[in-house]
Amino acid sequence: MFRHVVLFTWAEEATGEQRARVAEELGRLPAAIPEIRAYTLGADAGVSPGNHQFAIVADFDGVDDFLAYRDHPLHQAVIAEHIKPIVASRAAVQFEV
């Protein structure tokens, strides 16, 4: 299995509505991209200071399936239309599980 983890910190001017829309749009991807095996996302619980504010953990059968997700037009549209306008920082890692 191949895992993709992404962490976001939102720009100060990002509204609650914009943040919720990111989660909503990303949440639609598993139904549209069959290569996704598992997909978990959510806002930080606010327990520890200094954390990123939002996380995605996505699992795939292998690298090729991850690449299909990464490059999928719907995924790219969510990034361009909903994430990039409000993101302050992003961290990501991919690894074999």
Image (cartoon, rainbow, N blue to C red):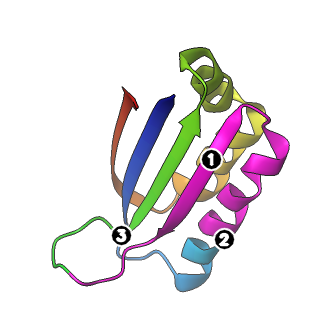
Residue type at numbered disc 2: Arg
- Is 74 left or right of 56, judged from the image as shown? right
Residue at mark 3 to residue at mark 2: CA–CA distance: 14 Å
Residue 60 position in % (x across, y down):
59, 32
Residue that label 3 marks: 53
- Is 6 left or right of 35, judged from the image as shown? left
Label of residue 38 in the image = 1
Q: Residues within 10 Å of mark 1 (few under 14, many from 20)?
A: few
Residue type at numbered disc 1: Ala
Frontmost of labels 1 and 3 is: 1
- Is 83 left or right of 78, judged from the image as shown? left
Under circle 2, the secondary element is helix
Q: Residue furthest left?
A: 49
Under circle 1, the secondary element is strand
Q: Residues within 10 Å of mark 3 (few under 14, many from 20)?
A: some
Among numbered discs 1 and 3, the one appearing first in the sequence: 1
Quarter placement of the C terminus: top left
Q: Give yes or no for contact between labels 3 and 2 (Cβ–Cβ under 8 Å).
A: no
Label of residue 21 in the image = 2
Residue 11 position in % (x across, y down):
37, 68
Q: Where does the magenta region start and end?
A: 22-47
Among numbered discs 3 and 2, the one appearing first in the sequence: 2
32 relative to 88, above or below: above
Residue 53 position in % (x across, y down):
36, 70
Residue type at numbered disc 3: Gln
Residue 13 position in % (x across, y down):
42, 76
Q: Is residue 68 magenta?
A: no
Quarter residue 34 falls in: top right
